[in-house]
Image (cartoon, grey):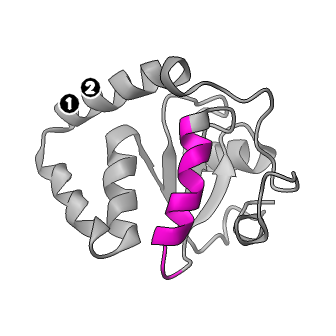
Amino acid sequence: MNVETEADPVVLFDGVCNLCVGSLPWLLRMDHRDRLRFGTLQSDSGTDLLEHCGLPQDYDQSMVVVEGETAYTKSDAVVRLAWLLGFPWALGSIAALVPERVRDRAYRWLARNRYDWFGTRDACLVPDSDLVDGNLRDRFLG
């Protein structure tokens, strides 16, 4: 992947987190414009994109939404993702009115407990696995 020419927003997620991976089918259904691309934080493409946006390659504190040179993390990533999904989900971006400190505290609480509540996968999700359908595979970073 050429990080400098990636035009569509990219959602980087924890590829071993069941909550994160389990959210992908829903995101695919809600992304009616087929704009979003996906990748794992642990993949080569993901770590290259993190570095390109000024984040450490081993960043794993939250989902990351990347648009151009801008990386949205923690609750800002959720707010931006809601906006990118369009109506009615874009209404959720009103959460940006809540102070970031408060939003991020809630995000960190969920992130800290996600493995305990939802479990983990034995291996990171990869686009060529049998677990990935063709629609997602086509929208996954190489």
Question: Which residue sits at x=48%, y=80%?
Answer: 32
Residue 68 visible at all: no
Q: Which mark is residue 90?
A: none
User: Quarter of the image holding residue 73?
Assistant: top left
Q: Where is residue 56 drawn, in percent x and y? A: 60, 32
Question: Magenta segment, which residues?
Answer: 19-33
Residue behind mark 1:
101
Give the amino acid at mark 2.
Arg
Looking at this view, is 13 or 56 the one in front?
A: 13
Q: For this view, does 53 lie left or right of residue 41?
A: left
Residues packed near mark 1 inside 10 Å, few (<14), some (14 to 19) or many (20 plus): few
Looking at this view, is 23 or 52 the one in front?
A: 23
Q: Please say if 118 is above or below 23.
A: above
Q: For this view, does 76 lie left or right of residue 34?
A: left
Q: Magenta span has 87?
A: no
Q: Please say if 139 is above or below 80.
A: below
Are circles 2 and 1 on residues that touch, CB within 8 Å? yes
Give the amino acid at mark 1.
Arg
Q: Where is residue 68 drawn, in percent x and y? A: 52, 65
Q: Where is residue 128 drawn, in percent x and y? A: 88, 56
Question: Which residue sits at x=44%, y=19%?
Answer: 112
Residue behind mark 2:
105
Q: Where is residue 100 drawn, in percent x and y? A: 21, 38
